[in-house]
Image: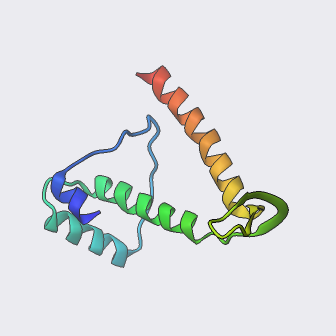
Amino acid sequence: MLERWRKDAAPALTAESYTVRLPLDDAARLHALAELFPGHSPEALITDLLQAALDEIGAAMPYEPGPKVIARDDHGDPVYEDVGMTPRFVELTRKHKKSLEATRATRA
C-alpha cells in the first residue's frame, strides 16, 4: 500500500459516498499519513486502508470443509467444498458490486 501511495494510482470509485466518524487516535494517525504522503487526501487514504482491512478479513475467514469433494490436490488428497463464511462473503460481494456498478453507470 505504501508503494501505491508513492505511485499515486487511484482505483475506480462508486457513485455512493460513506460518512464515518473516527476515534481521535485513528484520526490523528490518518492526518499523520496524509502529511507523510502529500497529495493523498485523508479520504483517499481511508479508501486504501479500508481495502486492506477488507482483504485481511476475507483472508482470515476460516475454511470449513463440507461433505462434497470438489478437487484433488497435488498429492491426490481430496479438497472439500468450503461451507464456511467465505463462499457467502464472495457471493454477497459479487451481488453488491454488480448493484454498485449499475448505480455508477446510471449516474455517469
Describe the colour scheme in one phrase: rainbow
Q: Residue at x 47, y 38 (%)?
A: 16
- If the image is split into quadrants, where does the C terminus sit? top left
- If the image is split into quadrants, where does the N terminus sit? bottom left
Outermost residue on the right side: it is: 67
Q: Residue at x 51, y 32 (%)?
A: 101
Q: 67 or 90: which is nearer to us?
A: 67
Drawn side of residue 97 relative to residue 77, left or right:
left
Counting the numbered discs, the total is: 0
**Picture coordinates of residue 30 (x, y %)?**
29, 68
Q: 104 or 42: which is nearer to us?
A: 104
Q: Residue at x 27, y 58 (%)?
A: 42
Outermost residue on the bottom side: it is: 25
Q: Residue at x 31, y 53 (%)?
A: 43
**Picture coordinates of residue 27 (x, y %)?**
32, 70
Drawn side of residue 11 relative to residue 69, left or right:
left
Res 24 → quadrant: bottom left
Res 74 → quadrant: bottom right
Q: 23 or 42: which is nearer to us?
A: 42
Drawn side of residue 78 relative to residue 1, left or right:
right
Drawn side of residue 59 relative to residue 12, left or right:
right
Q: 100 or 9: which is nearer to us?
A: 9
Outermost residue on the front side: it is: 75
Q: Is residue 105 above or below residue 70?
A: above
**Picture coordinates of residue 78 (x, y %)?**
75, 66
